[in-house]
Image (spheres, rainbow, N blue to C red):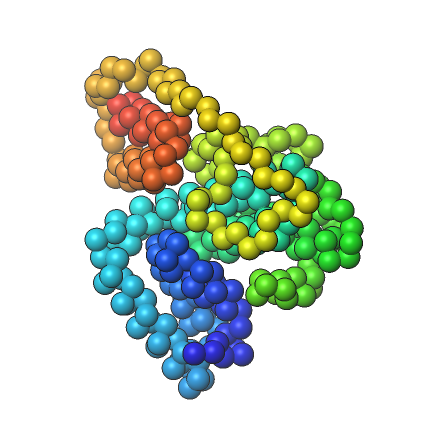
Amino acid sequence: MAVPPQLKAIQHLLRTAQEHDKRDPVIAYYCRLHAMQTGMKLDSKTPECRKFLVKLMDQLEMMKKELSDNESISQEVVGNAHVENYAVKMFLYADNEDRSGRFHKNMIKSFYTASLLFDVLSVFGELSEENIQQRKYAKWKAAYIHNCLKNGETPQAGPIGMDEEAYDDEFGAEGGGPSIAPQGPPQFQPSFHGHPTNQPPTSSFSNILIPPGSHAPANTPAEIPPPEVQPVKPVPVPRTMPAVDPSLLNNTQEGDVRLTPEDFTRAQKYCKYAGSALQYEDVATAVQNLQKALKLLTTGKE
């Protein structure tokens, strides 16, 4: 069923959902949920829009039943961690390609898809300032690199000033990508936790520490390989166990520690982040988040 013209703004969310139906049904589900919520705000009264949205709701209900045993669907905090982890890894894949000067359609799509997924996080509540920054940067980078390649220019790698570029409404016309309305770019330079823009960012995004050089999830869509760049086979590196904070080895509560309901919620979130990281075999991230949870539960402080 074609997307009504009034709901054109959600078609990229629906396309991303379709691409992930087999790859990652959880991502597909939340993309459709965000599309439905956005569509309801755009136009829920026009007969064709109402018919389309009702069908989308039915599809969501069916997916929810099929995925009922998946904690990422039944528990919002787990779903939040899953979507954020996926978005961050996709962002880092594109950012690593960008900083290495490897510009190609797959990295452009990864930047834009990451920006969409950061937006999808709004189904769980307000976005953090960091997620908003990542979303703006990823969307702008996708448009900037696309425009450069389309015009036969060589993009500048890494974070750069963004006050001279404008979004191109033809971006994504090739390969079914996104269309971005012409407008001024975000008026800021991403600092990534306060680091100068001419230096690499820290590997910390939204409480999820990912080792430098992390790649996109194994199921990141690969459309076209990097032009004139031969793939380099990664050299196996022995996995080492991250250092454990010695102060946490004695995991009993200190004195009269009174935990608030918010403390329990935060501790649960750290544990869920750790579980989600283990899905990607990311030991460092899992250990770091578990240590945060343990510290919070034993000291009442983060």
Residue at horizontal 23 percent and vertical 28 percent from the top: 258
**Left/right of residue 17 with respect to residue 63 in the rendered view:** right
Looking at the picture, tell me which residue is in the foreground, 262 or 156.
Answer: 156
Residue at horizontal 65 percent and vertical 36 percent from the top: 100
Residue at horizontal 46 percent and vertical 24 percent from the top: 237
For this orientation, the residue located farthest to the bottom is 47
Please indicate, yes or no, whether residue 182 appears anywhere in the rendered image.
Answer: yes
Looking at the picture, tell me which residue is in the foreground, 159 or 282.
Answer: 282
For the image shown, how many numbered marks are present on the structure? 0
**Left/right of residue 44 with respect to residue 193 in the rendered view:** left
Please indicate, yes or no, whether residue 28 appears anywhere in the rendered image.
Answer: no
Q: Quadrant of the N terminus?
A: bottom left
Residue 219 rendering spot, x and y as whole percentages:
44, 49
**Left/right of residue 206 with respect to residue 65 in the rendered view:** right
To which quarter of the image does residue 272 belong?
A: top left
To which quarter of the image does residue 112 belong?
A: bottom right
Q: Quadrant of the C terminus?
A: top left
Residue 85 rendering spot, x and y as whole percentages:
42, 43
Looking at the picture, tell me which residue is in the foreground, 108 or 46.
Answer: 108
Q: In this view, does 68 lie above or below 100?
A: below
Q: In this view, does 157 lie above or below 66?
A: above
To which quarter of the image does residue 287 belong?
A: top left
Residue 151 rendering spot, x and y as whole percentages:
77, 57
Looking at the picture, tell me which residue is in the foreground, 175 or 110.
Answer: 175
Residue 212 rendering spot, x and y as whole percentages:
52, 30
**Left/right of residue 179 with respect to residue 237 in the rendered view:** right
Residue at horizontal 45 percent and vertical 66 percent from the top: 14
